Amino acid sequence: MRKPFIAGNWKMNTDGHSGPELVKAVGQGFTQLDREKVDVAVIPPFVYLAQIVNAAKASRIAVGAQDIFYEQKGAFTGEISANMIKDVGCNYCLCGHSERRHVIGEGDELINKKVHAAINGGLLPILCVGELLEEREAGNTEQVVERQVKKDFAGLSVEKARAVTLAYEPVWAIGTGRTATPQQAQEVHAMIRELLAGLYDKSFADDMRIQYGGSVKPDNAKELMQQQDIDGLLVGGASLKADDFLAIIKASIAA
Ligand code: PGA
């Protein structure tokens, strides 16, 4: 079945001292757990990736980037390619995180190019989708998430699409302390899985890991993970404290 996948998105936090300390502390705790039962990744800011890859060695914690650019190289000032991310030792990269969609202004066409570039460059994208509060309140959650999934997967063969992990993150739950209830999250996850079965096939949909993200904390992680279609968690704030992140990893093993 689907192995739980817990990822910590550090966003624009940590520094050259606190980041390595954090990943080492998580790594130490993680070695005490049954590491076969869960995949774990941390997603630090670009400039610290090499340092964190180094500090995470021996702990079986994977490292990912928070974004990617879709071209391979050239005159794209400020951008980072899949090759570069791979070259420093990362396996994962986020695509379409809600802060990139709504603060930076990325649209689905761009996000789709990034997903293609990540996969073609040998990375595993964690593709984030999710509705705004006003979209939920207007009853448009399903429509919004369906549109994002269809546009962001456009042109991906089933073989390539297998590299993707999806993350359902209702925007109103991110960093607000307002988590979706396990039932609200499960409903959307089940809808996404059904959609994927239609876009590809049932076995593809059954294998796809879908993380939930948005104010995940040690005390709500287990109940979220007990939902049938929730296969992992994308954790922001609580991934910045080793004890909290470890408690979330433990809860996912226990669920
Ligand atoms: P949060 O962030 O856990 O701080 O709500 C989640 C995310 O943005 O991935």
Image: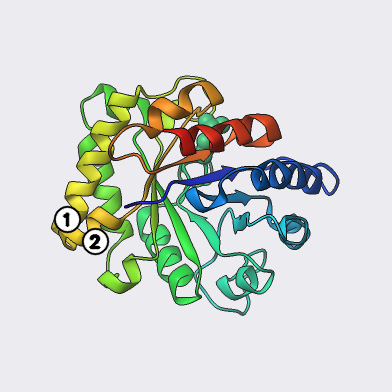
Q: Nearer the viewer, residue 41 or 58?
A: 58
The quarter holding residue 151 reads bottom left
Above or below, comparing residue 55 to residue 230 in the picture: below
Above or below, comparing residue 173 to residue 242 in the picture: above
Q: Which colour scheme is used?
A: rainbow
For the C terminus, give its image quadrant. Answer: top left
98 left or right, relative to 12: left
**Farthest residue in the right direction?**
17
The reply to whether the C-beta atoms of the residues labelled 2 and 1 are less than 8 Å apart is yes
Disc 2 target residue: 204
Q: Which of 235 and 77 is in front in this view?
A: 235
**Farthest residue in the left direction?**
198
Q: Which of 229 and 107 is in front in this view?
A: 229
**Residue 241 seen in the current view:** no
**Residue 123 seen in the current view:** yes
Near mark 2 (Cα within 10 A), the count class, few <14, some 14-19 or many ≥20, is some
- Three-letter amino acid code at disc 1? Ala
Where residue 162 appears, as percent x and y from the top left, is: 34, 65
Q: Distance between the residues labelled 2 and 1?
A: 7 Å
Above or below, comparing residue 169 to residue 173 in the picture: below
Q: How many labels does the image show?
A: 2
Where residue 57 appears, as percent x and y from the top left, is: 72, 60
Q: Which residue is drawn at 71% across and 40% down?
A: 13
- Three-letter amino acid code at disc 2? Phe
Instruction: Assign a secondary structure to mark 2.
Output: helix
Disc 1 target residue: 197
Q: Which residue is drawn at 63% across and 57% down?
A: 60
Where residue 178 appears, as percent x and y from the top left, is: 46, 19
